Image: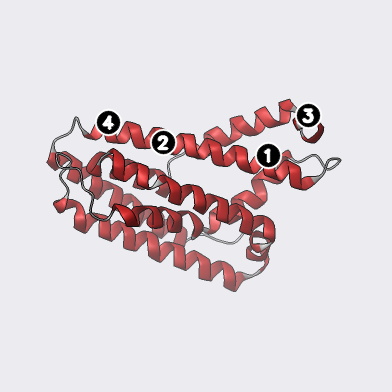
C-alpha cells in the first residue's frame, strides 16, 4: 500500500531532510535542554506531549488553510507573530527568575504539569511552524498520486522523528545535568531563559514571505 502512494526513495529523502530540521537548535530545543539539565529527566520528558500535540496542531492548521492565510493576511501574521514573541520572552524571563529555586539533587516536581502546556504553546504560537509545513512537505508530493494519503505518511513520519529527537534531547540533557553542580545547573537554566528571550525577539522581527 505504501508503494502505491509514495516511492521509497522520496520517503527516504524526506526522512533525511526532516532529521536535519528536527535536530536544529531552536526554542523547543533550548527549553528541552535547560529543563533536562536543571530539573531532571521527569521534567524534560513532560515537555514531549506538548511538543507532539503542538506540531500536530500546527500541521493540521497549515494544511487546513491557515498557513496559506498567513501568507496573504498581513494582520493575521503580525498578530500570531507577536503572540508567539511575547510568550517566548515571558517564558525566558520566568526561567531566569525560577533558576535560583532549582536543585537537581532533589528533582523538581512543582510545575511539571504546566511544562507540557508550555511546550504546546511554544510550538503552536510560532508562525514559522505553520509556514514551514506549508512550504516543506508539498515538495515531496507526487502530483499524480492522491495528496491526502501522502500528507498523512509525511506528517506521521515527521511527528515520529520529532518525538524520537525530543526523547533523545531529554535523556541526554537530564543525564548530563546529573554530572553538574547545582550552580552550573542554575546557570544553564538561565542560559536557556536568555535563549528563549532571544528567540522571542527573533520571532518579533519575522517578516511575512
Q: Mark 3 vs mark 4: which is more N-terminal?
A: 3
Residue 184 as seen in the image, left or right of residue 84: left
Q: For the residues marked 2 and 3, what is the alpha-carbon distance in whole angstroms?
A: 30 Å
The residue shown at (36%, 46%) is 46
Q: In the picture shown, does residue 42 fall above or below 129?
A: above
**Mark 4 or 2, nearer chain start:** 2
- The residue singled out by tag 3 in the image is 3
Q: Quadrant of residue 207?
A: bottom right
Q: Is tag 1's residue or tag 4's residue first in the polypeptide sequence?
A: 1
Neighbour tally class for label 3: few under 14, some 14-19, many 20 plus, Cα within 10 Å: few
Corner quadrant of residue 5: top right
Element type at mark 2: helix
Does 100 sit left or right of 65 as displayed?
left
Of residues 98 and 149, which is closer to you in this image? Answer: 149
Q: Which residue is mark 2?
A: 167
Say which label, 3 or 1, has the lower sequence index: 3
Q: CA distance from mark 3 to mark 1?
A: 11 Å
**Residue located farthest toward the right when viewing the structure as drawn:** 144
Between 84 and 55, the residue placed more toward the observer is 55
Read off the residue under disc 1. Answer: 153
Residue marked by disc 4: 175
Amino acid at each position: 500500500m505504501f508503494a502505491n502512494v509514495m516511492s521509497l526513495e522520496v520517503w527516504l529523502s524526506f526522512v533525511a531532510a526532516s532529521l536535519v530540521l528536527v535536530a536544529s537548535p531552536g526554542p523547543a530545543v533550548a527549553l528541552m535542554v535547560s529543563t533536562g539539565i536543571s530539573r531532571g529527566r521527569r521534567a524534560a520528558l513532560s515537555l514531549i506531549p506538548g511538543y507532539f500535540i503542538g506540531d500536530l496542531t500546527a500541521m493540521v492548521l497549515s494544511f487546513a488553510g491557515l498557513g496559506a492565510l498567513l501568507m496573504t493576511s498581513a494582520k493575521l501574521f503580525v498578530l500570531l507573530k507577536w503572540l508567539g514573541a511575547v510568550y517566548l520572552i515571558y517564558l525566558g524571563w520566568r526561567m531566569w527568575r525560577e533558576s535560583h529555586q532549582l536543585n537537581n539533587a532533589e528533582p523538581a516536581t512543582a510545575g511539571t504539569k504546566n511544562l507540557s502546556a508550555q511546550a504546546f504553546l511554544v510550538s503552536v504560537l510560532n508562525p514559522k511552524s505553520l509556514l514551514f509545513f506549508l512550504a516543506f512537505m508539498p515538495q515531496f508530493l507526487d502530483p499524480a498520486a492522491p495528496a491526502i494519503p501522502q500528507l498523512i505518511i509525511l506528517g506521521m513520519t515527521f511527528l515520529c522523528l520529532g518525538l524520537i529527537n525530543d526523547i533523545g534531547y531529554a535523556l541526554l540533557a537530564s543525564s548530563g545535568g546529573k554530572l553538574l553542580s547545582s550552580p552550573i545547573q542554575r546557570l544553564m537554566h538561565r542560559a536557556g531563559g536568555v535563549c528563549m528571550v532571544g528567540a522571542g525577539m527573533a520571532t518579533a522581527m519575522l517578516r511575512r514571505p
